[in-house]
Image: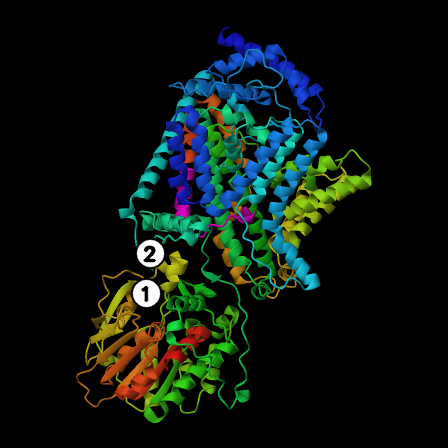
Amino acid sequence: MVFSSLLFIFAFLALNLFVYARVSAQYRNPVLLGFSLVFYAWGGPKFLFLLVGETFVSWLIALLISRASTDKARKVLLVTHLVILLGLLGVFKYAGFLLGNVQAVFGVPEVIPDFVLPIGISFYTFQLISYVVDVYRGQVQPQPRFWKLLLYSSLFHQCIAGPIVRYETIADEIDNRRFTRMGMYVGIRRFSIGLAKKAILANSCAAAVATLLPAGVDELSLQSTAGLWLGMLFYMLQIYLDFSAYSDMAIGMGRMVGFHYLENFNYPYTARSIKDFWSRWHISLSTFFRDYVYIPLGGSRCSTPKIVRNYAVVWSLTGFWHGASWNFVLWGLYYFVFLMLERFVIKDRMPKPIGHVYALLVVFFGWVLFYYTDPAQLSCALAGMFGFAGGGLYTMQVGTVFLSNMFLLTFSIVACFPFGKWLRGKMFEFAAEKPAALLALNIIEVATPIVLLLLSVVALVGDSYNPFLYFRF
Amino acid sequence: MSNLEQQRKIGQDQAEQSAYMEQTPQVEQNSYAEQEAFAQREVYTERVQQAEQNAYVEQVPQEEQTPQAELVSQVEQVSQEEPTPQAPQPTQPAQPTQAQRPSQPPRPPRARKRRATDVDLLPRQAMLLSKADRRTMGTWWTLAIKLFNGVMCVGFVLGLCLFLRPQVSEAENRKLTEFPQITWETFWDGSFTADVSTWYADTFPFRDQLMAVNHWMRGFYGIEPNEQVIGGERQADDIPDQASAPTTPPPAPEAKPPEDYDSSELETNIQGEIMNGTYVKDGACYSRYYFTQEAANAYSAAVNKAVQDLGDAGMVYSIVIPNNSGALLSDDELAALGGSNQADAISYYYSLYDERVRTVPTTDTLREHNSEYLYFRTDHHWTALGAYYIYRNFCEQKGIEPHNIADYEEVDFDGFLGTYYGSLKLDSMAKNPDVVQTWAPKGTNDMTFTDTEGNVVDWNVIEDVSAWNQGSKYNCFIGGDQPWAEIHNPNITDGSACVVVKESYGNAFVPWLVDHYQHVYIADFRYTSTNVVDFMKEHGVGDLIIINNIGIAGNVDVAGKIASIV
């Protein structure tokens, strides 16, 4: 089930909130668990077994680790867990890719079986790994109840594509959270903002991308330079709005029931350097890799060649996590190069405005690498962007798409900046001085989530095709 | 302890804690023992336990007790008209033991770090509001929650009202998704549930009205330029030189039985041919045309097969009609639009035929008259007037005298917004709808057709569609697209008959034939499986007219289907 669909909003979420509000406190977690399992099974019941199985293994191993007497036993258990979980992730997600490469080099095997990717496997696998490693490190008490751990790993807010929530973030809130009006309002607001970002902005940007960046090398080679640049600009906006909207919705829904998830995005397109960008983009993923790969490897507390090695490992893995294709690894290493450049060469010498432009350009070309999984299309697109396009520099089609999406483009770009927050702050300022302004502010505070929700529903009625980009993860 | 004192003590403790936190280095690996040691501080534990029992203050971690968070708790406090249900009380002994964590232990800084971007914190300017104002805000927020619940309720109930769900969409002119069949396989791999999601959204009650609002909303995305190009370029083959055309006709495509062709797939392919690359100017839409050698070979092979199979039993006429861009646009505009030259393509198609095929010239005649209303602006079809000029050319080929259009009575149906409007929904088109001009045959206006279910229906050659849906008015001609139709003219008794193999372009053309033949049989190749040549031999039909639009004739599957029924 996709968050931005009428079935989810009006059938699933409505029912979930209704039931959650009505049952007594002790049944709230089971209600959430039940709904989460149904939500996950909606994408294919057979994959539910994998999720439940992996959670069971994690639960068992975490308990064994906490009760183990020797360090060696704990280590063995941890390694077993990592092997199982990463092995399963590897099989489902990367086996096809690996076999494809083996076939390209050696010619065998002849036929590569089709592996269907279970939904959200990248997310919940990492969540469970973080749980067990945290138990191993003594940072977190193992959850004695299996079903509560299953609640953590399958919670529909974040299981499929939400922030990679660490167990320690919500460990206490599983048992001690409050279902309050404040939380409800804040959650509704956040959820509506996310839904509007997705249903109105991101989906429309996606439509523009589909028009300007045709599939297939033949059609792509006929696109003009301006078309390629505009198309990639729309894609850059789409991927941010799409993904951050999903995180917004997850955080909002969590807040409605009392969970506080950590922020996953912090206006990444306002970054002044690539390092800054990565502290604002998909924060849960980069912190995961920092805490569970980079720091165990030595982090920054070792010799320079080792630091470079650590960065290289982390960034190729980050890229690889995004998809089983070489262009993703290339994308990760692309950022590795710029990060090393910033750390060792540029250091702090870049002035801020130039830094902002530089970061945006680097990120823009990063998305070109990210978008095209096929090397032929990638080279075609890059050649086209630098003037060697089959369609010339500009065609009327590009002008048409630009003019008919002009305000959408402007609004999407504004949505990448904390303009809304600033505006809200200003309104509070005025409201403190004048009662009329206070009244206006209150009306707007009430209207914002409701209007956004209604507009999103209207936008969703027309979209029977509603892709979520990170869904293949 | 009073609330105020308690809060003051919390504040003091927090200050202490902040100092502690600052001193503690941000080590990457906090050992659990360190945390436990901190948790042993009785004062804090006690405070935490008391706060836990107190219903007023929301439990927020250390860093969140910023002024904003205080504000948040106060607003929360006053917005609670009814006590909220208690969170389950942790069963804690008075003294936390080594193995048990207190209900609200201190977190390692990393785990509960709240970024300043948390939208749920009120902006810092909120501190400027007075307590009374914050109280008011709380009640407004409660209103917001109530409205949200209301919207959810309405949506939930509406979603369940199965009787309110539409079956067809008038605006989109299509049948909406049906509720999927459940089988074990579809359930197991998730396709059943995915189809349910699609069905739920596609047939939501009041869909057409919501779509209208959606369309209005999308009007704000940008401005609609007067001249626009929608759809990208495609690869096209070069049209070979006439002189180098092969003397032997190209081979016939692989013969599949007619039942093997999926009519909805054909429809989708045809839709693709029309909508793939359109140019809009002044509310009129024009399609691009792409020539492919493969399609040319396939189509001409199908026509040649008909000639070969028919032999001396009848005469085959081929009419290939250019689309609106080829007939209406100036040479400059055509060059700017791109695509292949339609006049050359049609000549090339004709050059590939067996010499027994009689070809009817089309492009030049239409271009001669292109200041007249030959094609619709909002629909990809031609008008009955355009068909009339080609009918005159056909008569010339056949060697009969065409009738004069002035002898017919004209009946108009206005407010027609056709296929281009259906896809593009442009306002410039909506403001300038088309008029369907019709001229009913003098001999008879009666016909029968056999529909896709096999029922034989009595109908009119020109049906009165004034009350019909704005998108369907082109269906006034011969009942639209039916697999098989027949028109018998009682005023002609010489036994002359023809079979017209057509798609929807043929609809506007057929009425002109009625006054020349005793029997006119119409086969829509997309839906029929009747072998036309066999039919002709059985019933002594003399003429086979294959009439297609050039874009549709440019599809290989279309050619294959035609070949299968001749």
Left or right, residue A1 beside residue A108: left
Percent x, y of residue B79: 41, 20
Q: Which residue is mark 1?
A: B434
Residue A464 visible in the shown view: no
Asked where in the image residue A387 lies, by quadrant, the reply is: bottom right
Chain identifier of the residue bearing label 2 in the image? B
Residue A254 visible in the shown view: yes
Percent x, y of residue A355: 69, 41
Q: Which mark is residue B171?
A: 2
Tell me which residue sits at (70%, 62%) in the image.
A105
Identity of the residue furthest to the bottom in this view: B312
The magenta stretch spans which residues?
A451-473
Percent x, y of residue A431: 46, 24
Tell whether position A468 is magenta.
Answer: yes
Q: In the rendered view, tell whether residue B162 sits above or below residue A191.
A: below
C-alpha separation, residue under disc 1 versus residue under disc 2? 16 Å
Q: Nearer the viewer, mark 1 or mark 2?
A: 2
- Are the residues under badges 1 and 2 in a single subunit? yes
Q: Secondary structure at mark 1?
A: strand
Q: Quarter of the image for the N terminus of chain A: give it.
A: top left
Residue in the foreground of this view, choosing between B304 and B213: B304
Percent x, y of residue B342: 47, 77
Query: Could you tell me the amino acid type at mark 1?
Result: Asp
Tell me which residue sits at (45%, 55%) in the image.
B224
Q: Secondary structure at mark 2?
A: loop
Q: In the rendered view, tell whether residue A144 sits above or below residue A246.
A: above
